Image: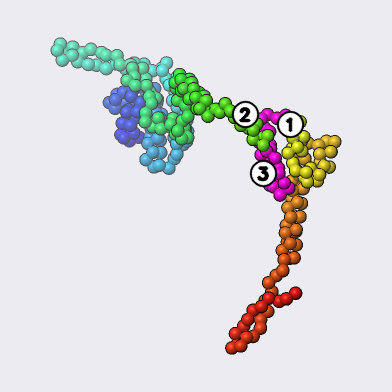
Amino acid sequence: MTDKSIDAFSDYDGLCSRDDFARLKTDEEAVYHEFKFRAILMAALEREVLDKTGDLFDLQRIVAEQAIEIRKLKNSNTQNATPSVASVTDPTSGSTNQIINPPCSRLPRATPALSETSSQRTIRTAKIDGPKPWNVDPAVDKVDFEIFYRHLMNKLEEWHNPNRMEKAQDEYDALNMESASDDYVDFKNKFVRLAGKVRKPKSEWINEFHRKLPTTFVTAMMPAFLAPDAMFESVAKYGQSIALNFAHARRRKEAKQKDKEPAARRIEKPRRGGSLHLEPRSQ
């Protein structure tokens, strides 16, 4: 055990000075064993920190293991440890007096044995990942929560629109699918959103959906509307397949119309001087 370990232990524990440690090492066998374990602990911690091979969890494991041994030994040694007697000569009278020195474990501590050091503060704060949302103190926690709650409710009051229901009802009444060429999926999504906003009962959704669709869609979707176990989800899904068929039919119709238009077909006829003259072919 090096002098550096002894000094580090003395500064850490705050029990006694280095001279007291050396005296107790020779005079108090029981207390010496206690200090031995503590010195081993500090040496291990010092080695871990200097080598930088272990992480925070290794240091915590070493502290826990050594603390268990120290606690066992201290419980058995405090009863057997006897106070040491030192002879001190009074410089004024020249007489020799005996001063009873209690063991180091019974000396008044300047600071707690495990007072919060910078390393322990690091261990405590390292467990917090990122900024803490609440204060650590429970008493301050309650105050912070009440302030946060009032701030949140005030913000919600600012965002509250008293005319929200009336506006949603107006949008719902004006919503209609004008023709079969309109976007069916967009209409269906708007219907679901607005029906939920105006709190329309879901049992009425099928009838309302039927009323807002164009005649061509209503005719094509009649099997889904007349089904005995008809539900809005199945009706809306059936309408999506009908909209897909209508889109294919429109594309085929547009393709046929393009084919019927007279195409400007060109023929090449040589002109005088060797130049080419392009004329449309007569049908």
Q: In which quarter of the image is the C terminus?
A: bottom right
Choose between 161 and 150: the one closer to the eye.
161
Q: Which mark is residue 202?
A: 1
Q: Does the magenta stretch include residue 197?
A: yes
Sort mark 1 into few (<14), some (14-19) or many (20+) by Cα contacts within 10 Å.
Answer: some
Closer to the chain start, of discs 3 and 1, is: 3
Q: Is residue 27 at all visible to an observer of this figure?
A: no
Dot 3 corresponds to which residue? 186
Nearer the camera: disc 3 or disc 1: 3
Q: Which mark is residue 165?
A: 2
Amino acid under disc 2: Met
Q: How many marks?
A: 3
Nearer the camera: disc 2 or disc 1: 2
Closer to the chain start, of discs 2 and 1, is: 2
Q: Does the magenta stretch include residue 188?
A: yes
- Do residues under tags 2 and 1 come within 8 Å of each other at their CB atoms? no
| In this picture, residue 124 sits left or right of residue 229 | left
| In this picture, residue 97 sits left or right of residue 143 | left
Q: Is residue 54 at all visible to an observer of this figure?
A: yes
As drawn, the residue found furthest toward the left would be 92
Amino acid under disc 1: Lys
| In this picture, residue 133 sits left or right of residue 209 | left
User: Residue 78, relative to residue 202: is it above or below?
Assistant: above
The magenta segment is: 175-202
Q: Residue at (46%, 30%) from the top-left corner?
A: 132
Amino acid under disc 3: Asp
CA–CA distance in space, label 3 to label 2: 21 Å
